[in-house]
Amino acid sequence: MANAASSINVLVVDDQDCLVELLADIVNGLGFGSEMAHDGLEAIEKFDEGNFQMVITDIKMPRMDGIELMKRIKENRPDVPVIAITGYGSESTEEELLYDGVDGFLEKPFRVAKIEGIVCDVLRKYELLE
Ligand SMILES: [Mg+2]
């Protein structure tokens, strides 16, 4: 069932404050709701308490990294797409991340138009957006 953009809530996770705020702003600018978390543990707590239709997560973070976060989410909620933030300094290749179950990539440095395309494509694939 496709939803209106306003009913989609995205959990944005990155240990860099400025980055997670920028991404949340971009997500809001697309008409979606957003919440922020700064590492995998905080993210899994927020995810369990909230109602999220998508997760966008950095890979390298303290306490719990993005791969572990994604695996925990997919274990219980395979219906929730997870997009990985990649770029300079990424330890995992995109091939490895796809194998782990990632649905898409946002490459740093960010380009707003590209983020919009990738986020909306993945939501449509899951029939969360028309
Ligand atoms: Mg990081």
Image: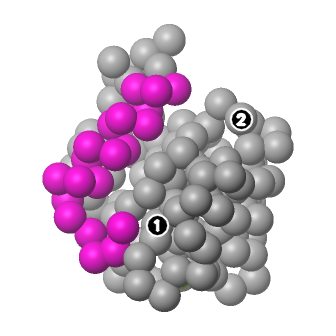
Whether pointer 1 and pointer 2 mark residues with C-beta atoms closer than 8 Å, the reply is no
75 magenta-colored: no
Q: Quadrant of residue 39?
A: bottom right
Examine the residues drawn in magenta and state their main secondary structure. Answer: helix
Residue at 41 percent of width and 84 percent of height: 88
Q: Is residue 3 left or right of residue 29?
A: right
Q: Quadrant of residue 25?
A: bottom left
* Disc ID at residue 85: 1
Q: Which residue is mark 2?
A: 78
| Percent of width and height locating residue 37 | 56, 68
Numbered range of the magenta stretch = 107-126
Near-viewer residue (46 or 115): 115
Q: Quadrant of the C terminus?
A: top left
Mark 1 / mark 2, whichever is N-terminal: 2
Q: Is mark 1 within 8 Å of ligand 1?
A: yes
Residue at 44 percent of width and 57 percent of height: 105
Q: Tell me the SS state at disc 1.
A: strand
Q: Few, some or many C-alpha atoms within 10 Å of disc 1 (few <14, some 14-19, many ≥20)?
A: many
* Amino acid at the residue labelled 1: Ile
Residue at 20 percent of width and 59 percent of height: 112
- Work out whether 120 lies above or below 16: above
Q: Is residue 38 left or right of residue 17?
A: right
Q: CA distance from mark 1 to mark 2?
A: 19 Å
* Disc ID at residue 122: none
